[in-house]
Image (spheres, rainbow, N blue to C red):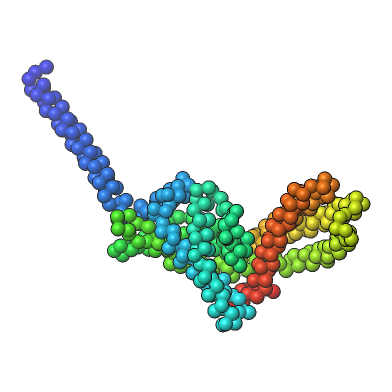
Amino acid sequence: MDDYTWQRRLRARRTQERRRLSLVFLLVAALIGAVVWYFFFFIRTPEYALEQIQTALTERDGEKFNHYVNAELLSSRAYDDLTVDLFAYDSELTPKTRAMFEKFYIMIKPQLAEGLETAALNRITAGSWNLPEGTDILKGRQLGIDFERFLERSQVRNTTLVKVGKVEHNGHSATADVEIMEEYTQTPFTLQLAMEQAEDGHWQVAYIKNYKAYLDKIAPLQNKDIADYIAATKDIVSDSNERFEVFQTRFKRLNSSKNGHLTKQQKINIAALIEDDIIPSLQSRQTQLDAVEVPAGAQYLARQRQQSTETSIKAWQHYIKGLREDSPAEFATAETLHKQELAIDLRVQDIIRHTAISKNIPNLP
């Protein structure tokens, strides 16, 4: 190889090496830039907070969720919007009665707002909507309100996140559009999340700007479907109620005793009434109800009726076992289940009553 050729190849090799070094330098610079942008800028943006909230929901990370959501303020503002919505369509309330109810809901706000917050956090960490248990004051109707029904009317259990949309910045506050879907009626909606920047620089969702607008859009749709479902099942319910009134009279007569103790024959007759008439009638009514097409917005009411039937049958089965085995434990279980059934039945009645007195609902019968 002559000297000229060797020098040319050497210059070419040096040029390639400089290009490689330049490329490496650019890649390193880009990486450093990305790291700097991520840790010193992006993590201090509303967009990052929204990403972390979605991650928290996926990973069931309650601590991370609470870091990027002001859950206390969110539930407080949502409570205010929800309790206003409770009266939105009630045509029977006088101004005086409305004021009384508003004062009542202000009094119990701390407990119910905290209950909403706790229920949502449990949903994130446990993956299910758990209702108050044990000595929790929200269990049952100790506060004069059915928390299960209250939670259902908040729509949180049947609302699905679709995607995060645009984010508008305004200094230390921002508004994020979030597309959602109401699952029962398959109604799309765009929530506007108010976001605020904390003192340490990270962002939080503070409250929902248009939550009441969402409730106002969904409530009439669901009420219309519930009204249609009630009308479609009216005869079934009416006929079964007449049968159960007869069974109730027979049950009371068979339980009649001068000394407070049932004879062996009485127990046999009572068990026969339950097994041959009451339980089959419960099953027959539910079969008829199940055959009725349930409108999308009436799914909750239909499910409550199913739960009532199932709970009632279990209660009667334990009652029969208590009769035959003379077991206080079985009677106690039957009583507990009976109370649960009564609570569900009262919830069903509340839904029917609310639908009947509602106004401004399209096409109510």
Q: Where is residue 56 drawn, in percent x and y?
A: 44, 49
Question: Looking at this rendering, what residue extends furthest in the right direction?
Answer: 265
Query: Looking at the image, how many numbered discs can be counted on the residues?
Result: 0
| Residue at 35%, 61% in the rendered image | 196
Asked whether residue 206 appears in the rendered view, the answer is yes
Tell me the quarter of the picture where residue 94 sits. bottom right
Question: Looking at this rendering, what residue extends furthest in the bottom direction?
Answer: 95
Q: Quadrant of the N terminus?
A: top left
Depicted 295 relative to depicted 90: above or below: above
Question: Looking at this rendering, what residue extends furthest in the front direction?
Answer: 259
| Residue at 59%, 66% in the rendered image | 143
The front one of 326 and 211 is 326
The front one of 224 and 108 is 108
Depicted 113 relative to depicted 275: above or below: below
Q: Is residue 10 left or right of residue 115?
A: left
| Residue at 86%, 55% in the rendered image | 261
The front one of 324 and 74 is 324
Q: Where is residue 185 drawn, in percent x and y?
A: 59, 61
| Residue at 63%, 74% in the rendered image | 358
